Amino acid sequence: MKIGIIGIGTLTLELAFRASKKGHTVLVHNPRGNTLVRETISKEESIKLSTLEHCAESDLVILFVPKHDLEAVISGLPDMTGRTVIHTSGLILDPKSLLSGLSYAMTYKITAALLPDAHVVKLFKPMKLESGLSVSAAPEKQKEEIFYISSNATSGLQVKTFLSGLHFEAKDLSARLRLHHTGLAGVNPFLSP
């Protein structure tokens, strides 16, 4: 599968390296300049720097772009009708506040509004901080949790399959988000249905 990554952040680099190790071809475009990531990704043969257009033509497109750059970047994309676009965001330090934070997820809402005919899937990877500023890493063999929401079942399944193949425990919060918006905010999104 060909993965196009537009924008560089901790999560997008992790996804790029994991996808590369699983045999996917990964194209990367950083709207702020590819020289920033050239050295980092040069160690992986199946990760290549590319143009915005080529990244957008991939089987899955992963987008990590600051809010103030979103409109300019998205206006440079080809027609994305029916395409799956995974929108990632900054760090989530408290997974328990994930659903309430989604209500105000401005970059996700802007992305979905600018790509009305694409299937935009929101992706979150909570990070646990323990004792000050040290980041706790998940044990090697244990799958790390990663959360997503999708209004399109086919795209949601495509993203879940992709993430599971990268050794993530992909959890779909789509139904729980709908419950949250309909007034059932007391539902704990981290308990299995």
Image (spheres, rainbow, N blue to C red):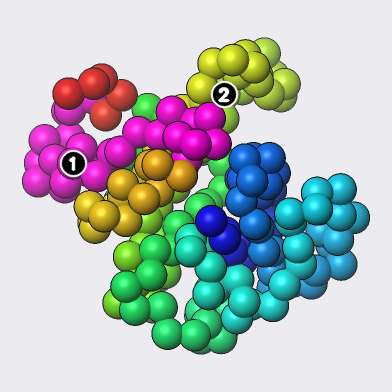
Does label 2 or label 1 sit earlier along the sequence? 2
How far across and how far down the image is residue 109, in percent? Answer: 36, 65
Query: Taking the image as drawn, is residue 146 in sight?
Result: no
Q: Amino acid at mark 1?
A: Ala
Q: Is residue 50 above or below residue 44?
A: below
Query: How many labels, in total?
Result: 2
Q: Nearer the viewer, residue 146 or 50?
A: 50
Q: Nearer the viewer, residue 65 or 27?
A: 27
Q: Nearer the viewer, residue 141 or 180?
A: 141
2 vs 1, front mark:
1
Element at label 1: helix
Q: Residues within 10 Å of mark 2 (few under 14, many from 20)?
A: some
For disc 1, the marked residue is 175
Element at label 2: loop
Q: Is residue 72 magenta?
A: no
**Image: magenta residue range:** 163-188
Q: Residues within 10 Å of mark 1 (few under 14, many from 20)?
A: few
